[in-house]
Image (spheres, rainbow, N blue to C red):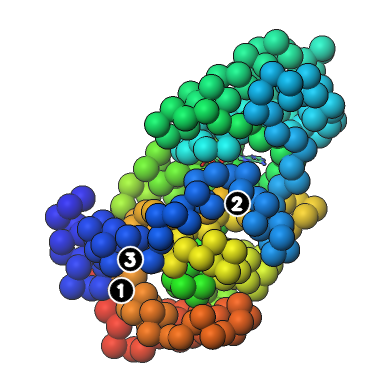
Amino acid sequence: MLKTYQALRRNGVIGINERNITYVNALNPRKLLVRVDNKLLTKQLAQAADIPTPELYGVIANARDMKHLPEMINHPDGFVVKPAHGSQGKGIIVVDGPLKGGWRLSSGRRIKLEDMKFQINNMISGMYSLGGQTDMAMIEYRVKFDDVFGKVSFKGVPDMRVIVLKGVPVFAMLRLPTAESDGKANLHKGGVGAGIDLATGLTMRAMQHDQLIDVHPDTAHPLENIQAPYWDDILLMAARSYDVTGLGYIGVDIVLDREKGPLLLELNARPGISIQIANRRGLRFVLEKAGALASDKLTAEERVAFAKTLSEKAADAGEPVIAPV
Ligand SMILES: Nc1ncnc2c1ncn2[C@@H]1O[C@H](COP(=O)(O)OP(=O)(O)O)[C@@H](O)[C@H]1O
Ligand SMILES: [Mg+2]
């Protein structure tokens, strides 16, 4: 993989060192990282700025809060419990609804109140937080995933990732779960990434394990020309995530709810660089163009309008495209 990236550098592909030095370290002040590392804070900041997120049902930080658990989870359509400082899906409990004195997990298994309390105690003791610091368990609305991406997902949760430089969306992709990724949309777990054209919200081309592919590996459905609904809203939510965090280089993760439309799931201050393979295009050109803009003087709407000019279809004809690998 290292070799692939070296070969791609001349096509404007940035590597992990360049990402870290020029973007992450330079544009994401350490003291602000708590805004994305603590999911409760992210949610509160987003709510204050009218960026929709899954509704918060409650927070459990100690034994006293635990007494209120039964009221917090009294939702016939299920709920999700997650560690506020968690990452990579660790510790997350997705409950579909009640089942015979307990609850049915998304995996189909049953969980009883005592077992749920046990897992929540593990969460708040810091089992899933970086450095093992004490944590909080957040209880929130369970997203009812829209089936627009049903034909290109395998048993899991698709999401959209938008890379945002100083408030300007520069790259986007649709991440799709596969049998291999076990319902997770993470690319390193074997999920599929499909580049999304910024101007139209249409998927362009896709990859799995850093290799280009045309159809979903499990459903065999073509991955090109799928329309991401609410595309303008998604771009606007991504652009506004900069205003509420002050972080100059972020990955914005958005899911699509059947009734509520796009919801912000989380923000990432160290977004991965494989998105370049999914777009078959390096990030450098768009990062430099967006970076040269005095974006702090523009409204989120103006930044979205600019983002659309970064679309490959609108881009300079001279820009190199990565050859199929
Ligand atoms: N509210 C929710 N409703 C349904 N599924 C969720 C919800 N929150 C998280 N998930 C599932 O858990 C995964 C990880 O959640 P996320 O908030 O991104 O935390 P992490 O930092 O662990 O990646 C999501 O990709 C999704 O599959
Ligand atoms: Mg995530």
Position in image of residue 89 (x %, y %): 51, 35
Q: Identify the disc placed on residue 284.
A: 1
Q: Residue at x 53, y 22 (%)?
A: 125
Mark in the foreground, 1 or 2: 2
Q: CA distance from mark 3 to mark 2?
A: 21 Å
- Which structural element holds mark 1? helix
Note whether residue 106 is visible. no
Mark in the foreground, 3 or 1: 3
Disc 1 marks a residue whose amino acid type is Arg
- Left or right: residue 52 versus residue 242 is right
Q: Which residue is mark 3?
A: 26
Quadrant placement of the C terminus: bottom left
Position in image of residue 174 (x %, y %): 52, 57
- 137 or 173: which is nearer to us? 137
Q: Identify the disc placed on residue 95.
A: none
- 111 or 246: which is nearer to us? 246
Q: Residue at x 30, y 73 (%)?
A: 284
Q: Residue at x 75, y 35 (%)?
A: 58
Mark 3 closeness class: few <14, some 14–19, many ≥20 residues within 10 Å: some
- 10 or 75: which is nearer to us? 75
